């Protein structure tokens, strides 16, 4: 059965896309910790990040770096934090989270955000 992220890749579930190529996709988290919180995934459905083949994993990090640079230009913050938890969806993914302090990376602070706000943030990031 396809994961939630595979359904997003296939266009069965909408998302606020930030960047995409033939191997990777970056889109906004619908329950962001901070505005601009983005998920970066390989399009290949692999459950665990450390099961990703080395070349694909290296490419994922390079892709995430490009996405992080765009987020940093669009969202006021000191840094873009990176986190790999990997328990929420059985499809490897990286969280890129705008942050000013370490507590800014606390998933307990995640909150539902309306689609209009997400669309506005996504547009801002894409245009950077």
Image: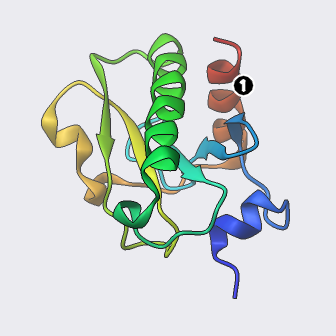
Q: Position of residue 91 (x, y in %)?
A: 52, 68
Along the viewing direction, whichever of 86 and 109 lies nearer the viewer: 86
Determine which quarter of the picture holds residue 25: top right
57 up-or-down from 9: above or below:
above
Q: Position of residue 113 (x, y in %)?
A: 56, 50
Label count reads 1
Seen in the picture, residue 96 relative to 88 is either above or below; the reply is above
Q: Position of residue 51 (x, y in %)?
A: 40, 67
Screen quadrant of the C terminus = top right
On the rendered structure, is 101 left or right of 45? Answer: left
Identify whether 11 is placed above or below 88.
Answer: above
Q: Taking the image as drawn, is residue 37 in sight?
A: no
Residue linked to disc 1: 123
Q: Position of residue 104 (x, y in %)?
A: 24, 39
Q: Residue at x 75, y 69 (%)?
A: 7
Few, some or many C-alpha atoms within 10 Å of disc 1 (few <14, some 14-19, many ≥20)? some
Q: Residue shown at 40%/69% (left/top)?
A: 48
Q: How is the image coloured?
A: rainbow
**SS label for mark 1:** helix
Farthest residue, direction right = 11
Q: Tell me which residue sits at (79%, 57%) in the image.
A: 14
- Residue at (72, 25) in percent of width and height: 123
Residue at far bottom of view: 1
Report the front residue among 118 and 67.
67
Quarter that holds the N terminus: bottom right
| The quarter of the displayed image where residue 100 is located | top left
Asked whether residue 16 appears in the rendered view, the answer is yes
Quarter location, residue 8: bottom right
């Amino acid at each position: 059965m396809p994961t939630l992220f595979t359904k997003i890749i296939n266009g069965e579930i909408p998302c606020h896309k930030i960047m995409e190529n033939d191997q990777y996709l970056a889109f906004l988290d619908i329950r962001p910790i901070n505005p601009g919180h983005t998920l970066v995934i390989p399009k290949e459905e692999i459950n665990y990040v450390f099961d990703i083949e080395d070349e694909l994993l290296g490419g994922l990090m390079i892709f995430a770096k490009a996405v992080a640079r765009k987020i940093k230009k669009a969202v006021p913050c000191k840094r873009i934090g990176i986190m790999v938890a990997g328990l929420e969806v059985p499809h490897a993914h990286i969280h890129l989270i705008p942050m000013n302090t370490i507590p800014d990376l606390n998933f307990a602070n995640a909150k539902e955000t309306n689609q209009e706000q997400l669309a506005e943030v996504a547009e801002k990031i894409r245009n950077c």
